[in-house]
Image (cartoon, rainbow, N blue to C red):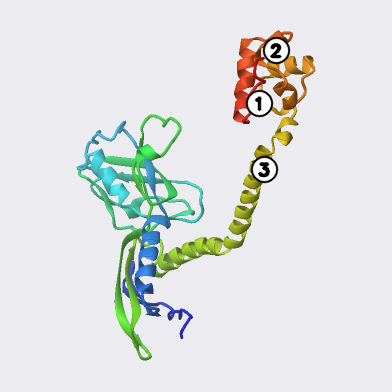
Amino acid sequence: METNISLPKAPTLTELSPNKAVIEIEDLYPGYGLTLGNALRRTMLSSLPGAAITSIKIKNAAHEFSTLPGVIEDMIEIILNLKQVRFKLHGDEPQTVFLKAKGEGEVFAKDIKTPSQAEIVSPDVRIATLTSKNAILEIEMKVEKGLGYSAIESRKRDKQEVGVIAVDAIFTPIKLVNFSVEDMRVGDKTNYNRLKFEIETDGSITSFEALAAAANLLNDHFKIIAATPAKAEKKSGAAEEKVKIKKTEKEEGEDMTKIKIEDLKLSSRTQNILVKNHIKTVAGLLRLSESELLDLEDVGEKAVKEIKKVLGKMGFTLKQED
């Protein structure tokens, strides 16, 4: 009887456009098409890093409800357009990019000036339209790396300087991921799976890079899980032994009575009073009744109450009154 799960063929890629492709994985063991398809799709959509604008500063615009002379779009429209601009950062540090446009005409993402660590991958996104020769649009933008979608409220920041407008950021480089599973023949069996992905990115990574990154991320998780059972079993056994030891100590009251006063969870004042009265262990306390405790020097009702509470947690009580 067959006991091994056969592995699939390497993925094949068919490009539909520069940022869109279909990737097929054939010869998957029955049921593995859906298993891998769900895991890879969810990982691609949620866990791949990307870059986006997180804050902007527009000259002569104090807030997002401002308007600029000679610019058709208001600030809200400009911000929405800027969210469509996609970047690729070569490094993990945030980068500042600048846009300066003057005179009549349309302003596009390709007009943004970037440092060497930042690259615009969507140059054709229209940002604004200037309608007069004297119109000026100057924007300073902060670009950062992140995962998924980041609302303004979820980003804890220091107080922003005047004129800086924080914006929601869509970091994920994935625009679309769909998958389908078909049955296929392998040898004399017809229930093997063909897994087909349709992946569209923002251009900062390719479709195949996105699939590979998701697979590597899942693989990193699986490696940790696969290496865990022996350690988990050992830890579980140690914990069980620890519980057993504690239980044995509790059952054997003699051992508990040897605990020193300094090791009890008593206040420093109460500990000092007991030691001063030559009571050094739990056994010494158990020989006394409540009234005998009160007869000791400096012992009051509060100290007795504290002592009874600690002894009670250990399963002990003071000596009964005669």
Q: Quadrant of the C terminus?
A: top right
Above or below, 61 against 35 in this view is above
Residue 164 visible (yes or no): yes
Instruction: Sort mark 1 into few (<14), some (14-19) or many (20+) by Cα contacts within 10 Å.
Output: few
Q: Pick the residue in front: 171 or 47.
A: 47
Q: Pick the residue in front: 99 or 151.
A: 151
Tag 2, which secondary structure?
helix
Q: Are marks 3 and 1 in contact (CB under 8 Å)?
A: no
Q: Position of residue 214 (x, y in %)?
A: 43, 63
Q: Is residue 284 left or right of residue 52?
A: right
Of mark 1 and mark 2, the one earlier in the sequence is 1
Amino acid on which disc 3 is placed: Thr
Of mark 3 and mark 1, the one earlier in the sequence is 3
Which residue is drawn at the image coordinates 65% and 21% (left, top)?
A: 318
Which residue is drawn at the image coordinates 41% and 32% (left, top)?
A: 160
Where is residue 188, by image quadrant?
bottom left
Circle number at residue 265 = 1
Amino acid on which disc 2 is placed: Glu
Circle number at residue 292 = 2
Above or below, 126 against 278 in this view is below
For the residues labelled 3 and 1, the Cα–Cα distance comes to 21 Å
Q: Is residue 203 left or right of residue 269?
A: left
Above or below, 154 against 224 in this view is above
Q: Position of residue 190 (x, y in %)?
A: 32, 85
